[in-house]
Image (cartoon, rainbow, N blue to C red):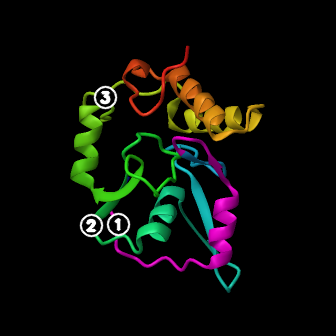
Amino acid sequence: MSKSAGLQLAIREADVQRFHAKVIITSTCWVWGGAVGGRDGYGRFALRRDDRRQRTVSAHVLAATVAYGAIPAGSTVLHDCDFRLCVRTDIAGHVRISTQTENVRQAVRRGRSRGPHPGMVDVRGPAGVARAVQDALRASPDRSPAGLALVLAQTLADGDPLRDNLTLFEPLP
């Protein structure tokens, strides 16, 4: 994730309602169910303007802005849960405002650095895993938050070479 330029987002109540209508709530992460970036796998949301134009922002950045206010210049929005589609801001361990330095350190610690020596990342690629999770959650017959969390954990584990190190989700039997 890139650093914030400190720009103010013009967020209206109608935008917040549209946003929340696209969130799939599990007992762990709140998963963005809308548009996904074709390369990076982050959720995308279009903020509408009066002049019929729109501004597209990352779903987790919008969630953090609604929860915490404007993202300070030079800061970044960090996923402690290590899941790009998570937009949960109500408890620790998910989406929060941080620094890019901490974001990189966290990626290195978790073996997910994509620098000169790439870490082990999901074999489906960022957008592939995002779409696989969304599809699996939509298809789940169990709509309870706990049931959806199990579907989320299993779908993430399916393509993650580090699946034994996922600490946020309960292991499946």
- From what the image shows, is residue 37 above or below residue 151? below
Residue 18 part of the magenta-drawn span: yes
- Residue ID for mark 2: 74
Of residues 99 and 151, the one nearer the viewer is 151
Q: What amino acid type should be assigned to the residue bearing mark 1?
A: Ser
- Residue 88 seen from this side: yes
Q: Secondary structure at mark 1?
A: loop
Query: In the visual, does 16 lie left or right of 58?
Result: right
Cα distance between the residues tagged 2 and 1: 5 Å
**Cβ atoms under marks 2 and 1 closer than 8 Å:** yes
Q: Residue at x 64, y 63 (%)?
A: 19
- Residue ID for mark 3: 118
Q: What amino acid type should be assigned to the residue bearing mark 3?
A: Pro
Q: Secondary structure at mark 3?
A: loop
Of residues 114 and 143, the one nearer the viewer is 143
Q: Residues within 10 Å of mark 2 (few under 14, many from 20)?
A: few
Q: Residue at x 31, y 72 (%)?
A: 72
Q: Secondary structure at mark 2?
A: loop
Q: What amino acid type should be assigned to the residue bearing mark 2?
A: Gly
Quarter of the C terminus within the rendering: top right
Of residues 46 and 39, the one nearer the viewer is 46
Of residues 143 and 101, the one nearer the viewer is 143
How far across and how far down the image is residue 42, in percent? 52, 48
For this orientation, the residue located farthest to the top is 173
For the magenta stretch, what is the residue range?
3-29
- Residue ID for mark 1: 4
Q: Residues within 10 Å of mark 1 (few under 14, many from 20)?
A: some
How far across and how far down the image is residue 163, in percent? 43, 21
Marked residue nearer the N-terminal end (2 or 3): 2
- From what the image shows, is residue 96 above or below residue 111? below
